Amino acid sequence: MGIRGVLICALIASLTSLSDGSLDCDEVRKVFQLKQIGPVKSVPEKPRTGSDLQVCVSKNLTCCTKKMEERYQVAARQDIQNLLQISSSTLKYLISRNVAAFQETVESLVRQAENHTHTILLHTYGDLANHAAAPVGEFFTDVSLFALGSELSLEEASQGFFEALFPLVYERLVEPGLSRLSPAYAECVRGACRDLAPFAGAPGRLAAQISRASLPGRLFLQALHLGVEVINTTDHFQIGRECRRALLRMNYCPHCQGLTASKPCMGYCLNVVRGCLASLAEVDSHWREFVRSLETLSARMHGGQDLEQVLLETYGLVRDAVAHAQKNGPRLTAQVHKVCGHPSRQPEQVGSVQHPTSSRDSIPLKGPIRYAEETLSKLRKEFINRLRLYRTFYGGLADQLCVSELSSADGLSCWNGADVGKSYTLRVVGNGIKAQAENPEVKVKEVDPVINQVIDKLKHINQLLQGRSIPKLGTLDQIETGSGDGYSGDCDDEDGCWGSGNGATERRRTVTLLTPEKSNNHRYHHTQTEDFDRLNSGARVIQTFSPTFLLICAFALLSG
């Protein structure tokens, strides 16, 4: 047959082997169906020329059609988005779970503070506590809403609480009688509360203390919500056409040649994924700063900025405010008579008078209990320790996906973008937009606009967390103490040493932000009045500053 005949036979055998054995579309069809990429009928029965293909171009025969290529491109986009969501799921759960835990703990602390306040009033002033339960509950509901970020005026809530409390204090402690005040007279007493200031500066002081302690926590929760928003945005990052084609070439073009089990070489994978996720890499430095800023803010939340401590000490201020009104009974009586006339009382009903000692033993008196496992400070510390592990999340995201999910482990039988079994020899670029100028696989020129918006939000919250967005005008401590002279023994309560408390201060602010033995005669019961008087010696100064100014100074304190 001769040499020519042998070569012709060998060529025919080679072509027969290529079409019948070396490239089998059955395996491609199985994977196409298994991954639910598209209808199986799209896969050809036998290898074909790929003249109509745009991305998976090959000199050899192929098992792909143009419709398959389009389906593969959609699958490649879905694959990378699924991987992004899987990679961030633990981080997202960490933040979301702690948001819920912080909210539950704050609500629990507020309920505990409410219970302690009621208990103290009950043991100190008997039946007064039962009638004051409604305003106490309403006030602490507002405190809970404010601490968790609601837009309400805590000054108005505090003032309203003490206004509701004043008629009860007046009829039971200041000018007690055998029957209750008539509704009309009680309403007159309530309306006179702002002008008479029976509780001195207690309403403003209570609001200021809780506001100051709540603001860091509100900001902390706001930052965590933003953290979840950042993750949600990057999870659904929309990759561009250039990137979709590169991912198609990397992940599914090998299928067209029957190489359904092959994976890309590491260098090839890094170039493609670093290019596709270049915008996400730009989040890295701001995310790192976000984690550091949360840690710094958490470390400053102690003392007067510890919401837990302030809430669990609220009962003392309320108790002492009532004692202050009781001590100044004669002056208040004369002032109330001047405004409202002499008391008009309801007709006495048999059995209507409740003796304050009847319920003294109904609730055991205990001081505030702070369970270590439930404290806000411990929750924050544990959360920050775990969050630190994710501070480089965005900087290493592309590399993590290649190492853990996408690239070939051995590096020997990897796909280099054109063939299998050969190494990837092109230059591997770094992370970020600038580095992609030299990327041989994907061309990216600028940060995605949606990611730019996320970065701007991170910059803003970082400034708030660090206190850099508010001018340093002083601290709330300096404002509260006024001139710093404190209580002077040269004047008495008739001269106004406890502050006017007449409500002259601005009344509206919106933020987009233990027990002494009880005597039977409560008229002469002065519980810790001296300490309360000293605390309120600068109350007049508090009332002269606007709540907005107090808010600015509270934020400024965070930068201290």
Image (tube, rainbow, N blue to C red):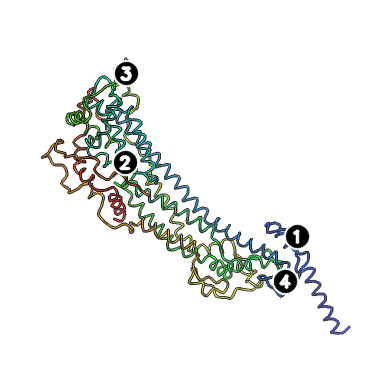
- Residue closest to the far left: 490
Q: Is 77 in front, or is 408? A: 77
Q: Mark 4 or mark 2: which is in front?
A: 2
Q: Where is residue 295 in the image (x, y as percent from the top left)?
A: 38, 54
Q: Where is residue 530 in the image (x, y as percent from the top left)?
A: 18, 36
Q: Can residue 417 be seen in this view?
A: yes
Q: Mark 3 points at which residue?
A: 352
Q: Are the residues tagged 4 and 1 within 8 Å (C-beta)?
A: no
Of labels 3 and 1, earlier in sequence is 1
Q: Label 3 vs label 4: CA separation?
A: 97 Å
Q: How crowded is mark 1: few (under 14 residues within 10 Å), some or many (20 or more)?
A: few
Q: Residue 98 carries which label?
A: none
Q: Mark 2 points at which residue?
A: 156
Based on the displayed image, in which of its 4 quarters is residue 374 positioned? Answer: top left
Q: Label 4 vs label 1: CA separation?
A: 17 Å
Q: Position of residue 124 (x, y in %)?
A: 27, 28
Q: Position of residue 349 (x, y in %)?
A: 31, 16
Q: Mark 1 points at which residue?
A: 41
What's the amino acid at mark 1?
Lys
